Image (cartoon, rainbow, N blue to C red):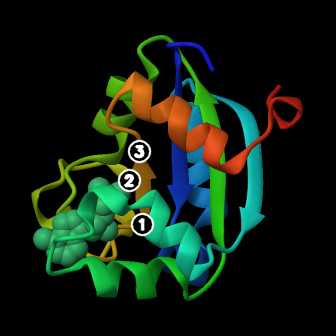
């Protein structure tokens, strides 16, 4: 992956509420190109590994339960300044603090069930994208 790419997941709450189409529309209307995408479901081992950085946080068990309870949409997105611009588009982790018009402001209910993930650095975008996709699944 190059530095103009980021990785996202539309989380189980977003999928359950039927918001895949609305969120993807907002993402593409904001200038992101979809490079890779799949509907999939994390195993407990997947979620524990993906969120290993949070393993000592009190919310970790609930985070793993939440992220494995149903399907997610995983995607790699391309745009100049992708990581930073996507984090601006999704808004603050806590939707009550997310700016008006951001994805979490519009579609998330709580800090724990916050609808979307966005990588926090170019390095993590590469690691997270490769966690879900092989090179031949990236366009
Ligand atoms: P995200 O930033 O995508 O990745 C880590 C996730 O942990 C975060 O989204 C939330 O889903 C969850 N999370 C972060 N902070 C808290 C918190 N204080 N309480 C509960 N869940 C949290």
Q: Which residue, given by chain and number where applicable, does mark 2 sit on? A: 103
- Is ligand 1 closer than 8 angstroms to the Cβ of mark 3? yes
Q: In whole angstroms, how far apart are the C-alphas of marks 1 and 2?
A: 8 Å
Q: Which residue, given by chain and number where applicable, does mark 3 sit on? A: 118
Residue 11 rendering spot, x and y as whole percentages:
51, 68
Residue under the image location 63 percent in, 20 percent down:
1
Residue 41: quarter of image: bottom right
Query: Within 10 angstroms of label 1, few (less than 14), some, or many (20 or more) residues?
Result: many
Say whether disc 1 or disc 2 marks the residue closer to the N-terminus. Answer: 2
Residue under the image location 80 percent in, 38 percent down:
134
Q: Residue 115's mark?
A: 1
Residue 91 rendering spot, x and y as whole percentages:
26, 47
> Which tag is nearer the camera, tag 3 or tag 2?
3
> Which tag is nearer the camera, tag 3 or tag 1?
3
Residue 78 rendering spot, x and y as whole percentages:
60, 23
Say whether disc 3 or disc 2 marks the residue closer to the N-terminus. Answer: 2
Number of marks present in the image shown: 3
Q: Secondary structure at mark 2?
A: helix
> Is disc 1 in contact with disc 2, using a CB cutoff of under 8 Å?
yes
> In the image, is 82 to the left or to the right of 19?
left
Q: Secondary structure at mark 3?
A: strand
Query: Within 10 angstroms of label 2, few (less than 14), some, or many (20 or more) residues?
Result: many
The quarter of the rendered structure image containing the C terminus is top right
> Which tag is nearer the camera, tag 1 or tag 2?
1
Residue 88 rendering spot, x and y as whole percentages:
29, 34
Residue under the image location 40 percent in, 40 percent down:
119
Q: Residue 35's mark?
A: none
Residue 17 visible somewhere in the drawing:
no
Residue under the image location 73 percent in, 68 percent down:
40
> In the image, is 128 to the left or to the right of 120?
right
């Amino acid at each position: 992956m190059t530095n103009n790419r980021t990785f996202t997941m539309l989380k189980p709450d977003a999928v359950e509420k039927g918001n895949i189409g609305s969120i993807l529309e907002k993402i593409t209307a904001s200038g992101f190109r979809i490079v890779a995408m799949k509907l999939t479901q994390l195993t407990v081992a997947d979620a524990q590994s993906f969120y290993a950085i949070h393993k000592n946080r009190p919310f970790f068990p609930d985070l793993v339960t939440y992220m494995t309870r149903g399907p997610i949409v995983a995607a790699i997105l391309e745009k100049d300044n992708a990581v930073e611009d996507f984090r601006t588009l999704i808004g603050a982790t806590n939707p009550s603090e997310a700016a008006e018009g951001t994805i979490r402001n519009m579609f998330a209910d709580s800090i724990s069930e916050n609808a979307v993930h966005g990588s926090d650095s170019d390095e993590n975008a590469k690691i997270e994208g490769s966690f879900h996709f092989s090179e031949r699944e990236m366009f």
